[in-house]
Image (cartoon, rainbow, N blue to C red):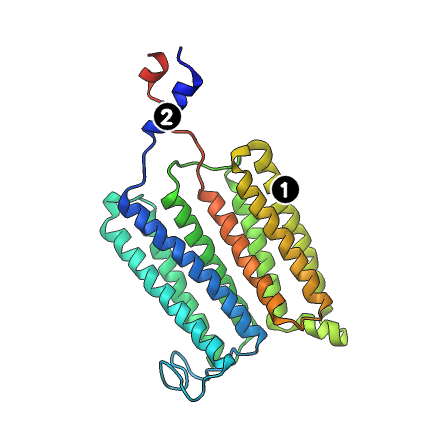
Amino acid sequence: MISTTHLRSVASASAPSASPLRRRLGLLSAHLVVALIALVGVGGATRVMEAGLACPDWPLCYGSLLPGRQMNLQVFLEWFHRLDAFVVGVGLLVLAGVSCWRRRALPPWLPGLSIAAVLLVAVQGVLGALTVTLLLPFPVVTAHLLTALLLVALLSVCTQGLLAEAPGLTVPWPWLPGLVAAAVVLQCALGGLMASQWAAGLCLRAGDGCGWLLAHRLGARAAALLVLALAGLLVWRRPQQRAWAALMAALVLAQVALGVISLRLSLAVPAVTIAHQLGAALLVAVLAGLMARGDRPPTVPSQAIHG
């Protein structure tokens, strides 16, 4: 019988390494995740600064690709939001095209997932157009945010699936990270509905629409407890994933703190509200990436065990 150290060295040597193409596509997917999180942040800034209709037409802005004389902070936010969305769309088309063209050299799940991302970004474009042409109806604005978060989750799964060297899940139950991610996304949807109707501001100023704020608070508590429970489970059952657990816990505690500070400041500081939305997108990305992150040890050849 050979030693545990020898087994680990053989297992490490037999672990498949990512191909250069797979790694490049993984890096492209990672950059798209960053761009999507930025898109959510800029979208939040656009709403807080009441710039959603700063460009009165779509897809151009004041009839041009780059408005000059009309440019101010509000117009810039809306224009940059559209520019970022366009860049993400082009990147997703490249990812889908290469995934389908070189599908034999890539994981079998990648073409379908990348095509689904392209379809989602097309839906996102339609929702963006309706947001402007229908003058910011709150169901469309919320659906626009939800689609962006779904794209963040999908690309985060794609990134970890491409860059992780071993398959498998970091938690004992495969459905658990997905359940927690779904709870966070639903909480974001509730926050989006509240924000798009300016319910928190109305409640603080006039005591109107406080039901939305109460529901958001209760949902935040439930989502935070789920995230912290998952982080604790990771520390207990997968000590090597403590960094993921610490990141999740830090993000959700920061979210709670930002939410409280935002209300204490009566929503008067846009940077706090924007940071709150950015934190939500980051948390969704981490939870979704956890679903695809692997730590299952590779199979050890039988001759190494008995040699």
Identify the residue under disc 1. 229
Q: Is residue 270 left or right of residue 294?
A: right
Residue lying farthest to the bottom in this orientation: 69
Please tell me whether residue 6 is drawn above or below residue 61 in the rendered image. Answer: above
Residue 174 placement (x, y as % from top left)? 50, 39
Q: Is residue 220 left or right of residue 134?
A: right
> Which quadrant holds residue 213?
bottom right
Please tell me whether residue 50 is drawn above or below residue 165 in the rendered image. Answer: below
Identify the residue under disc 2. 11
Please tell me whether residue 187 is drawn above or below residue 15 in the rendered image. Answer: below
Amino acid type, residue under disc 1 in the picture: Ala
Q: Residue at x 57, y 63 (%)?
A: 277
Callout 2: 10 Å neighbours few (<14), some, many (20+)? some
Residue 256 placement (x, y as % from top left)? 66, 56
Question: Quadrant where the N terminus lies?
Answer: top left
Please tell me whether residue 27 is drawn above or below residue 237 in the rendered image. Answer: below
Q: Are marks 2 and 1 in contact (CB under 8 Å)?
A: no
Q: Residue at x 63, y 56 (%)?
A: 255
Q: Residue at x 65, y 71 (%)?
A: 269
Q: Residue 117 or 39: which is nearer the viewer?
A: 39
Q: Earlier in the sequence, mark 2 or mark 1?
A: 2
Instruction: Report the mark closest to the observer, 2 or 1.
Output: 2
